[in-house]
Image (spheres, rainbow, N blue to C red):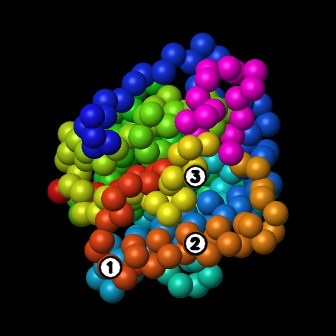
Amino acid sequence: MSLETEQPIETTRPYGTEMLAGEYEVMYRVEDQFWWYIAMRRNLLALLQKHWDWTAQPQPTILDAGCGTGANLEQLVKGFGGRLNTRQAWGLDVSAEALGFSQKRGLGGRVIQGSISEIPCASDSFEIAISFDVLNNLPDDQAGFNEIGRVLKHGGIFILNLPAYQFLYGKHDRAIGGRRRYNRAQVAKKLAEVGLKVERSTYLNTLLFPPAALVRLLNTRPNIQTAHSDLTSPPDMVNKVLSKIMSLESQVLGRTNYNLPFGLSVMTVARKL
């Protein structure tokens, strides 16, 4: 069976769909410095620069659907240090705990509580929507795709990141409330069903895939008592090296149209027709 034809497996999670206790606090503590989060923000910036016409539409309205503890939303509100005019950005998250950490970032007036499955906004409200590692947590992920399709304006773009490959499902996924992982074909099908056409779909964390996949495969036993996320900060030097390696991928996203062939995540840009 190829990676692209692998079928999703619905995971029974008797302990609920939320993150395990303490994971939001861990996320809040590490996401400004942790190499993976730094890489994701670089990737987001590269795709925004490449796939949005900032001359024709210089002030897009933006929704961060599943904003968590607010690091991406904070960068959007600040325009990525003045590099883009993304300041008309708002966040949505189902977790009051996560939004509490967003408020600590000064984003209190920018966030609302609600589910990506039932976004409390009018149809055709946003020109850009982003969602990083959220739809995989939903009992019914298609409901989330449907809602993004509803609130996006025609011509708007959706930048989506999801964990890749169901065979890698393990302790990290359980700790953060994840129910499934995806390949590119599965994501494209979900998007097409709500009228969104894929413009770019690439795997990420390609260079680190072999060792990371091996670790994941060795930690796939479903034991909730030992489940924990991968958000453990490495030594500073290791963190810097990993961040540097990952910066190569953001350059590929920003400077080329090449899609990486495999990785730990799948990132997609789709436009509402």
Q: Quadrant of the C terminus?
A: bottom left
* Mark pair 1, 3: CA separation: 26 Å
Instruction: Examine the rendering and report whether any part of residue 100 can be seen.
Output: no
Q: Give how far across and how far down residue 42 sits, in percent.
A: 54, 72
User: Mark 2 sits on what residue?
Assistant: 245
Q: Secondary structure at mark 1?
A: loop
Image quarter for residue 77?
bottom right
Residue 223 within the segment the image draws in magenta: yes
* Residue positioned 39% across, 73% down in the render: 253
Residue picked out by circle 1: 256
Q: Residue at x 50, y 76 (%)?
A: 248
Residue name at image x 53 percent, y 84 percent: 83
Where on the picture, by quarter, is residue 52? Answer: bottom left
Q: Which residues, given as a range, are shown in magenta?
A: 216-230
Q: Are marks 1 and 2 in contact (CB under 8 Å)?
A: no
Q: Compare residues 250 and 60 and report the one nearer the observer.
A: 250
Q: Mark 1 is on which residue type?
A: Thr
Q: CA distance from mark 2 to mark 3?
A: 14 Å
Q: Is residue 139 left or right of residue 1?
A: right
Report whether 139 appears left or right of 52: right
